[in-house]
Amino acid sequence: MTNKILFKYIDHPDQDKIATYIENGGYLALRKALKEFKPEELVELIKKSGLRGRGGAGFPTGLKWSFLPKNMNKPIYLIINADESEPGTFKDRQLMEYNPHQLLEGTIIAAYAIKCHLVFIYIRGEFAYCAQQISRAIQEASSHGFVGKNILGSGFDLDIHIYRGGGAYICGEETSLMESIEGRRALSRQKPPFPAIEGLWACPTIINNVETISNIPHIINNGAEWFASIGMAKSVGTKIYCLSGHVKRPGNYELPMGVSLRELIYEYGGGIIDDYALKAVIPGGSSVPILRADEIDVKMDFESLAEKGSMLGSAGVIVMHDGTCMVAALQKLVKFYEHESCGKCSPCREGTNWMNKILKRMLAGEGRPEDVDLLYDVASNIIGNTVCPLGDAAAMPVMSFIRKFRDEFDNICGGGKPYGTISFPFR
Ligand SMILES: Cc1cc2nc3c(=O)[nH]c(=O)nc-3n(C[C@H](O)[C@H](O)[C@H](O)COP(=O)(O)O)c2cc1C
């Protein structure tokens, strides 16, 4: 079996057009789902497949769907989260640009499974081409009877709307995203109630990531056991790893869950640019704890990375060579979180600003020896003290950078020169 499921046709010209998609087996899963399964059976099938969310938290998809209240007299909504703003993450974009019908087919099946008749695809504002592609795909699918009234004679009706994102990282957080769709500023909501109980316009709502939903047609076509047999025991299926930074061949690599980080960097990524030594890797998007070069013999799945004190997150793998100054790299990250904090919770709003100030002071050569502990202390007072996890996302890198590279922070605060000059592998 080829490793590729979602990217199987990535190099195929015109896979984004419905005729080619259908030629390559597209929309067979939809026909099968509507004909052979009751909605509840599909929820069970997805549960059995072991599919877990690819948006960051790895929550089991079928289980999430099963939280929807039964027999409630309210509409159920499905939101596809295509906001993709986590630094180092660029897989959903490629899935939408090159294979929009795969996402659409998964969306229609998911909507049928959860008895939803109105879907919102929330696309990052800057992704203009993705929005065009998805919009065209919806029109094509409608003209083939896959979207709209009485889909393929099944009696199931579905409308799909595109919502262009509000242009902020926080818009990808599910509760802020719903605020944004409802026409307000994207400020996160307190949970509970969870969206499955009270989401969009206080109605039951399921929110799933683009990659999560793109897997659905393949599970219907090939079965839950097939999917569960790929990858690791608890992290199943393939994963699209977004490899960036100081590697020779950056890009998206779809591989079975559990590929080793070393293999990803050195075999798929071709090793470190200019044959530098490796210094550090952020394995799951900018908000997860960093790993040192001697920690890369780890499998890239939810459990193995958690055992190493980090996270798979969105699988945005950011590689840094030994010319990188970790203080400067951290300041770039913290500046991002300071800018993107929605401002609702004081620990995040004030804390990200304070951390950025301390780091800027360090880089200007004005750091005081006590600043390292102060920085750590500010981060540890943000973590767990905000409504949404953006605060944690800002604090976790800070604490892990200090824990793993404390000598660099102490050195710069003691009047030393930065170790390395290159501040960060991306702008
Ligand atoms: C600050 C922040 C930003 C997020 N951005 C995204 C995003 O761009 N795309 C995404 O799918 N999930 C994002 N998430 C996670 C979502 O809140 C949600 O858990 C996810 O869309 C659920 O989908 P899944 O179960 O398929 O993973 C973000 C979370 C936080 C805290």
Image (spheres, rainbow, N blue to C red):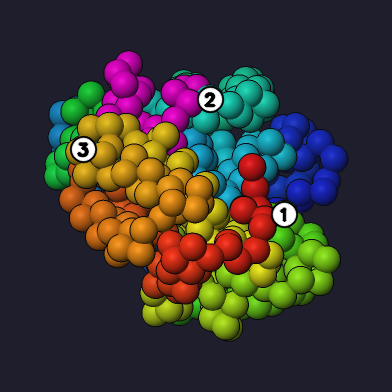
Give coordinates of residue 8: x percent, y percent.
73, 55
- Earlier sequence position, callout 1 versus callout 3: 1
The residue singled out by tag 2 in the image is 125
Which region shows up in magenta?
Answer: 163-187
The answer to which of 422 and 125 lies nearer the viewer is 422
- Does residue 67 lie above or below 159 as drawn? below
The residue singled out by tag 3 in the image is 345
Mark 2: secondary structure: loop
Query: Badges 1 and 2: C-beta atoms under 8 Å apart?
Result: no
* Amino acid type for the residue under numbered disc 2: Gly
Horizontally, is 197 left or right of 92 in the view? left
* Amino acid type for the residue under numbered disc 1: Gly
Q: How crowded is mark 1: few (under 14 residues within 10 Å), some or many (20 or more)?
A: some
Q: Residues within 10 Å of mark 3 (few under 14, many from 20)?
A: some
Q: In which quarter of the image is residue 316?
A: bottom right
Query: Badges 1 and 3: C-beta atoms under 8 Å apart?
Result: no
Residue at image position (51%, 30%) is 123
Mark 1: secondary structure: strand
- Earlier sequence position, callout 2 versus callout 3: 2
The residue singled out by tag 1 in the image is 251
Q: Judge depth for marks 2 and 3 and give the one in front.
A: 3
Residue at image position (54%, 62%) is 326
